[in-house]
Image: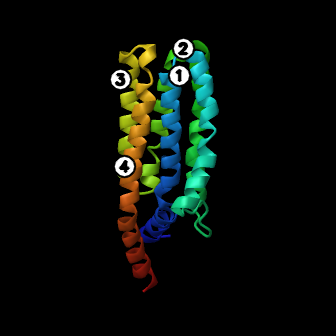
Amino acid sequence: MNHLEFHKLKLELAVKSKKGADFILAACLVWLIIAYIWFVGEESYNKSVITLIVAALLLPLALSFSKILKTDWKVDKNPLQPLGLWLNFAQLFYFPFLIFVLLTLPDYFVMTYAIITGAHLFPYAWFYDDNSYAIMAGIISASSLIIGLNVSGDAMFFIPLLTATSLLIMFIILWFSISKTKEKWVSIVEATTN
Protein backbone atom coordinates (compact mmCIF):
# COMPACT_ATOMS: atom_id res chain seq x y z
CA MET A 1 0.00 0.00 0.00
CA ASN A 2 1.47 3.36 -0.97
CA HIS A 3 1.26 6.60 1.02
CA LEU A 4 -1.62 7.98 -1.04
CA GLU A 5 -3.74 4.84 -0.53
CA PHE A 6 -3.02 4.94 3.20
CA HIS A 7 -3.96 8.63 3.40
CA LYS A 8 -7.17 7.88 1.48
CA LEU A 9 -8.14 5.28 4.12
CA LYS A 10 -7.51 7.75 6.95
CA LEU A 11 -9.55 10.47 5.27
CA GLU A 12 -12.37 8.04 4.57
CA LEU A 13 -12.60 7.33 8.31
CA ALA A 14 -12.45 11.02 9.15
CA VAL A 15 -15.24 11.87 6.73
CA LYS A 16 -17.58 8.98 7.46
CA SER A 17 -17.18 9.21 11.23
CA LYS A 18 -17.20 13.01 11.01
CA LYS A 19 -13.94 13.06 12.95
CA GLY A 20 -15.57 11.62 16.06
CA ALA A 21 -17.78 14.69 16.50
CA ASP A 22 -20.51 12.58 18.11
CA PHE A 23 -18.14 11.46 20.88
CA ILE A 24 -16.77 14.98 21.39
CA LEU A 25 -20.28 16.42 21.73
CA ALA A 26 -21.30 13.62 24.12
CA ALA A 27 -18.15 14.19 26.17
CA CYS A 28 -18.91 17.92 26.31
CA LEU A 29 -22.33 17.19 27.81
CA VAL A 30 -20.91 14.65 30.27
CA TRP A 31 -18.24 17.12 31.41
CA LEU A 32 -20.91 19.82 31.90
CA ILE A 33 -22.75 17.42 34.21
CA ILE A 34 -19.47 16.68 36.01
CA ALA A 35 -18.91 20.45 36.43
CA TYR A 36 -22.29 20.70 38.13
CA ILE A 37 -21.46 17.74 40.40
CA TRP A 38 -18.22 19.41 41.49
CA PHE A 39 -19.99 22.76 41.94
CA VAL A 40 -22.51 21.51 44.51
CA GLY A 41 -21.46 20.96 48.11
CA GLU A 42 -20.48 17.33 48.69
CA GLU A 43 -17.36 15.58 49.84
CA SER A 44 -14.76 15.08 47.11
CA TYR A 45 -14.91 11.30 47.44
CA ASN A 46 -18.68 11.27 46.82
CA LYS A 47 -18.32 13.67 43.88
CA SER A 48 -15.63 11.41 42.44
CA VAL A 49 -17.81 8.31 42.64
CA ILE A 50 -20.75 10.17 41.08
CA THR A 51 -18.39 11.42 38.36
CA LEU A 52 -17.49 7.83 37.46
CA ILE A 53 -21.18 6.90 37.32
CA VAL A 54 -22.01 9.89 35.11
CA ALA A 55 -19.11 9.03 32.79
CA ALA A 56 -21.00 5.86 31.87
CA LEU A 57 -23.44 8.10 29.96
CA LEU A 58 -20.79 8.85 27.33
CA LEU A 59 -21.37 5.84 25.09
CA PRO A 60 -25.21 6.03 24.98
CA LEU A 61 -25.01 9.80 24.40
CA ALA A 62 -22.45 9.32 21.61
CA LEU A 63 -24.72 6.73 20.01
CA SER A 64 -27.65 9.15 20.19
CA PHE A 65 -25.58 11.98 18.72
CA SER A 66 -24.35 9.64 15.97
CA LYS A 67 -27.97 9.23 14.86
CA ILE A 68 -28.55 12.99 14.90
CA LEU A 69 -25.23 13.89 13.23
CA LYS A 70 -25.39 10.90 10.86
CA THR A 71 -21.96 9.52 11.67
CA ASP A 72 -20.75 6.02 10.88
CA TRP A 73 -19.23 4.00 13.71
CA LYS A 74 -18.15 1.22 11.42
CA VAL A 75 -16.58 1.70 8.01
CA ASP A 76 -16.60 -1.66 6.27
CA LYS A 77 -13.60 -2.66 4.17
CA ASN A 78 -11.37 -0.05 5.81
CA PRO A 79 -8.56 -1.87 7.65
CA LEU A 80 -7.80 1.19 9.81
CA GLN A 81 -11.29 1.31 11.31
CA PRO A 82 -10.55 -0.89 14.38
CA LEU A 83 -7.64 1.39 15.33
CA GLY A 84 -10.04 4.09 16.56
CA LEU A 85 -11.48 1.69 19.10
CA TRP A 86 -8.02 0.58 20.23
CA LEU A 87 -6.93 4.20 20.70
CA ASN A 88 -9.95 4.73 22.92
CA PHE A 89 -9.27 1.59 24.95
CA ALA A 90 -5.74 2.85 25.65
CA GLN A 91 -7.09 5.31 28.22
CA LEU A 92 -8.53 2.44 30.28
CA PHE A 93 -4.99 1.49 31.30
CA TYR A 94 -4.79 4.78 33.20
CA PHE A 95 -7.81 3.90 35.33
CA PRO A 96 -5.80 2.13 38.07
CA PHE A 97 -4.06 5.46 38.63
CA LEU A 98 -7.45 7.17 38.69
CA ILE A 99 -8.71 4.69 41.31
CA PHE A 100 -5.56 5.31 43.36
CA VAL A 101 -6.31 9.06 43.32
CA LEU A 102 -9.95 8.36 44.22
CA LEU A 103 -8.92 6.36 47.28
CA THR A 104 -6.00 8.51 48.46
CA LEU A 105 -6.48 12.07 47.13
CA PRO A 106 -10.14 12.48 46.12
CA ASP A 107 -9.80 16.29 45.94
CA TYR A 108 -7.62 15.75 42.88
CA PHE A 109 -9.78 13.10 41.22
CA VAL A 110 -11.48 15.42 38.73
CA MET A 111 -8.13 16.98 37.81
CA THR A 112 -6.64 13.54 37.17
CA TYR A 113 -9.66 12.42 35.17
CA ALA A 114 -9.55 15.57 33.03
CA ILE A 115 -5.83 15.10 32.36
CA ILE A 116 -6.46 11.51 31.26
CA THR A 117 -9.38 12.61 29.10
CA GLY A 118 -7.36 15.36 27.47
CA ALA A 119 -4.27 13.23 26.93
CA HIS A 120 -6.22 10.41 25.30
CA LEU A 121 -7.30 12.82 22.53
CA PHE A 122 -3.73 13.27 21.28
CA PRO A 123 -3.40 10.23 18.95
CA TYR A 124 -6.65 11.16 17.23
CA ALA A 125 -4.84 14.13 15.69
CA TRP A 126 -3.04 11.59 13.51
CA PHE A 127 -6.00 9.23 13.18
CA TYR A 128 -8.40 11.91 11.90
CA ASP A 129 -5.70 14.07 10.32
CA ASP A 130 -6.82 17.02 12.46
CA ASN A 131 -4.50 19.02 14.71
CA SER A 132 -7.34 20.30 16.88
CA TYR A 133 -7.18 16.97 18.72
CA ALA A 134 -3.50 17.54 19.59
CA ILE A 135 -4.05 21.17 20.56
CA MET A 136 -7.03 20.41 22.80
CA ALA A 137 -5.19 17.44 24.35
CA GLY A 138 -2.48 19.87 25.46
CA ILE A 139 -4.88 22.60 26.55
CA ILE A 140 -7.13 20.30 28.59
CA SER A 141 -4.27 18.39 30.24
CA ALA A 142 -2.01 21.36 31.04
CA SER A 143 -4.86 23.68 32.10
CA SER A 144 -6.34 21.00 34.35
CA LEU A 145 -3.00 20.60 36.11
CA ILE A 146 -2.50 24.35 36.47
CA ILE A 147 -6.02 24.89 37.84
CA GLY A 148 -5.80 21.84 40.10
CA LEU A 149 -2.56 23.03 41.68
CA ASN A 150 -3.82 26.57 42.23
CA VAL A 151 -7.41 26.33 43.50
CA SER A 152 -9.01 24.93 46.62
CA GLY A 153 -11.11 21.77 46.61
CA ASP A 154 -14.28 23.88 46.46
CA ALA A 155 -13.18 25.47 43.18
CA MET A 156 -12.26 22.23 41.37
CA PHE A 157 -15.44 22.59 39.30
CA PHE A 158 -13.46 24.96 37.08
CA ILE A 159 -11.59 21.94 35.70
CA PRO A 160 -14.63 20.10 34.29
CA LEU A 161 -16.05 23.43 33.16
CA LEU A 162 -12.85 24.15 31.24
CA THR A 163 -12.88 20.60 29.83
CA ALA A 164 -16.49 20.93 28.65
CA THR A 165 -15.80 24.34 27.10
CA SER A 166 -12.68 23.03 25.34
CA LEU A 167 -14.63 20.07 23.99
CA LEU A 168 -17.42 22.35 22.74
CA ILE A 169 -14.89 24.56 20.93
CA MET A 170 -13.29 21.43 19.50
CA PHE A 171 -16.65 20.11 18.31
CA ILE A 172 -17.31 23.37 16.46
CA ILE A 173 -13.85 23.31 14.85
CA LEU A 174 -14.26 19.66 13.83
CA TRP A 175 -17.76 20.16 12.50
CA PHE A 176 -16.77 23.04 10.24
CA SER A 177 -13.63 21.27 9.00
CA ILE A 178 -15.42 18.13 7.79
CA SER A 179 -16.34 19.58 4.37
CA LYS A 180 -12.72 20.50 3.67
CA THR A 181 -11.60 17.00 4.70
CA LYS A 182 -14.26 15.53 2.43
CA GLU A 183 -12.93 17.58 -0.50
CA LYS A 184 -9.41 16.22 0.16
CA TRP A 185 -10.73 12.67 0.35
CA VAL A 186 -12.73 12.99 -2.87
CA SER A 187 -9.73 14.40 -4.74
CA ILE A 188 -7.52 11.52 -3.55
CA VAL A 189 -10.20 8.97 -4.48
CA GLU A 190 -10.39 10.51 -7.96
CA ALA A 191 -6.59 10.59 -8.29
CA THR A 192 -6.22 6.93 -7.31
CA THR A 193 -9.04 5.65 -9.55
CA ASN A 194 -7.69 7.28 -12.71
Q: Residues within 10 Å of mark 2 (few under 14, many from 20)?
A: few
Q: For the residue marked with disc 3, what is the amino acid?
A: Ile
Of mark 3 and mark 4, the one earlier in the sequence is 4
Q: Is residue 122 above or below residue 15?
A: above
Give residue 160's position: percent from left, percent from top. Answer: 45, 31
Q: Where residue 161 sits in the image (x, y, percent)?
A: 42, 32
Residue at (50%, 33%) from the top-left corner? 116
Question: Which sits earlier in the primary sequence, circle 3 or circle 2?
Answer: 2
Residue 145 to residue 63: above or below: above
Label 3 secondary element: helix
Q: What kind of residue is marked 1?
A: Phe
Tell me the distance, in whole angstroms, between the alpha carbons under discs 1 and 4. Answer: 26 Å
Task: Tell me the tag on residue 109.
Answer: 1
The secondary structure type at the circle numbered 4 is: helix
Q: Is residue 130 visible?
A: no
Tell which circle, 1 or 4, labels the residue nearer the N-terminal end. Answer: 1
Residue 190: which numbered mark, if any? none
Proximity of marks 2 and 1: CB atoms separated by less than 8 Å: yes
